[in-house]
Amino acid sequence: MTDRRRIDPAAPDPELLAEAARRVVAGGVIVFPTRHLYGLGADALNPEAVGRVFALKGRSPAKALSVLVRDESMLTGLVREVPAAARLLMERFWPGRLTLVLAAAPGVPEALSGGQGTIGVRLPGHPVSRGVMARLEVPLTATSANRAGEPGAHTVDAVSEAIRAGVDLILDAGPLVPGAGSTVLDLTHGTARVLREGAVSAAAIRAVLEGD
């Protein structure tokens, strides 16, 4: 039976956060709360762990996975460069709300980019996901804990039984408040291109980049 632990979303137990980080480092997969949905977390640089995430979701290998980082320093070795526009947007909209698509660094598992040579990165906003990341030296996969084509889960009980049975640890922070997902912004072509508009509007992004 999967290890399922209740965790206070406002004041998460440091021991539980550390245990989640240990499971990730050991190649495990965890279910954990993000801002609005439960996510599937694994060491994003461990191909076997990433493969487990794809298998649990039934996700096509052609679809990229975004990742969570602890801070900007974790982008070193993960992306080729951090453009000035990315720094402006990170300063304004991180943590949470905005996923930046950047050119992946050499050696980053191809599964993360869906073979496109890019990678989506985000600094998490939820106290539990932030707490887990603070204890990791590797990025964490940031995909939602649902089977491909099915809606995301706002509670652990809404996560499919197959996923719950297939992970190593579940951090149950209770019901999450529904809301818009992160905006996904591609910065790999010289101009900012919104791939999915979510919590941050295209107008707000444009205002930052134009200096308004």
Image (cartoon, rainbow, N blue to C red):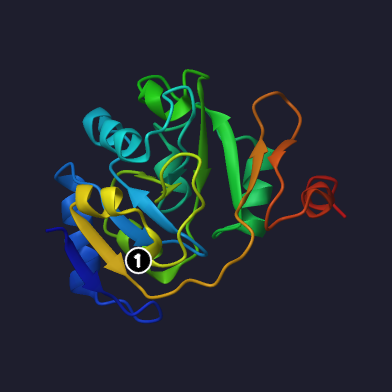
Figure check: 106 above or below 180: above
Disc 1 target residue? 157
Nearer-the-camera pick, 133 or 75: 133
**Left or right of 126, for residue 209:** right
Q: Residue shown at 38%/25% (left/top)?
A: 111
Figure check: 10 above or below 99: below
Give the number of callouts: 1
Nearer-the-camera pick, 28 or 147: 147
- Residue 104 placed where, x, y %? 48, 26
Quarter the N terminus occupies: bottom left
Nearer-the-camera pick, 33 or 13: 33
- Residue 194 placed where, x, y %? 73, 39
Q: Residue shown at 24%/36% (left/top)?
A: 49
**Left or right of 73, for residue 92:** right
- Residue 24 placed where, x, y %? 22, 49
Quarter the C terminus occupies: bottom right
- Residue 50 placed where, x, y %? 30, 34
Q: Residue shown at 14%/45% (left/top)?
A: 26
10 Å neighbourhood of mark 1: few (<14), some, or many (≥20)? few
Quadrant for residue 173, please give it. bottom left
**Left or right of 50, for residue 112:** right
Where disc 1 sits, the SS reads helix
Q: Amino acid at mark 1?
A: Asp
Quadrant for residue 159, please give it. bottom left
